């Protein structure tokens, strides 16, 4: 199993002692078995980088399953907007989204480094890329664990979290 404490140094550790992370080819793994759809990753990203309202480097889709009774929670990364959090990497930390996740559903690593633990996690958990031909801004180097077939055609729109909310912060359409 991958190291769920990676990138989250103990509060007593001075960041001055943590070396910067040198990542040649950034990649993410998303373990959908762990994702609870809480949006903490998306909020952490937007907060860390002062992303304007309505723009999402990473957004979490709540996708009704074909049974229409349950949801799949799927964090979707934007190729053009996600910067892999270079600021955190330069401070020796994992990206803000990874550090914020309460269930350790997100793993970050260097796909160019065969020694990086993300390779073992991708292989061990049989993680796969999300193929969504209609999505022109899907981040490529993201691997998902237990990706369900129905997801690929559904990522443009998830459930409206509160149908009574006329101006939802987490509207599920759009960018
Ligand atoms: S913070 Fe983790 S659990 Fe919450 S939506 Fe993001 S990936 Fe899922």
Image (tube, grey):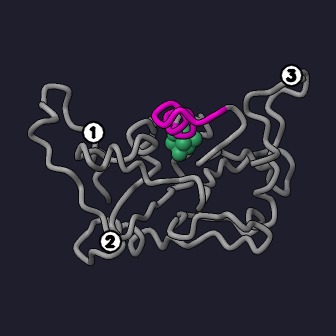
Question: How far is mark 3 from mark 2, CA to CA?
Answer: 43 Å
Q: Residues within 10 Å of mark 3 (few under 14, many from 20)?
A: few
| Image side of residue 55 versus residue 23, left or right | right
Q: Residues within 10 Å of mark 2 (few under 14, many from 20)?
A: some
Residue 47 in magenta stretch: yes
x 59%, y 62%: residue: 79
Q: Earlier in the sequence, mark 3 or mark 1?
A: 1
The residue stretch that appears in magenta: 41-52
| Image side of residue 47 versus residue 153, left or right | left
Residue 61 in magenta stretch: no
Which secondary structure type mostly characterizes the magenta part of the structure?
helix
Whether ligand 1 has any atom under 8 Å from the Cβ at mark 2 is answered as no
The disc at residue 120 is: 2
| Image side of residue 172 versus residue 7, left or right | right
Q: Is residue 43 above or below residue 82?
A: above
Q: Earlier in the sequence, mark 3 or mark 2?
A: 2
């Amino acid at each position: 199993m991958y190291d769920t404490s990676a990138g989250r140094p103990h509060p007593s550790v001075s960041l001055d002692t943590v070396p910067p992370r040198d990542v040649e080819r950034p990649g993410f793994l998303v373990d959908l078995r762990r994702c609870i759809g809480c949006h903490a990753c998306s909020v952490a990203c937007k907060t860390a980088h002062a992303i304007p309202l309505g723009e999402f480097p990473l957004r979490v889709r709540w996708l009704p399953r074909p049974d229409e009774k349950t949801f799949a929670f799927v964090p979707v990364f934007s190729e053009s907007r996600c910067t892999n959090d270079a600021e955190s990497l330069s401070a020796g930390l994992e990206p803000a989204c990874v550090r914020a996740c309460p269930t350790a559903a997100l793993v970050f690593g260097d796909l160019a480094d065969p020694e990086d633990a993300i390779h073992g996690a991708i292989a061990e958990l049989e993680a796969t890329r999300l193929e969504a031909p209609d999505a022109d801004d899907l981040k490529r180097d993201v691997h998902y664990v237990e990706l369900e077939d129905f997801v690929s055609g559904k990522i443009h729109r998830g459930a409206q979290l509160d149908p009574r909310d006329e101006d939802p912060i987490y509207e599920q359409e759009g960018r």
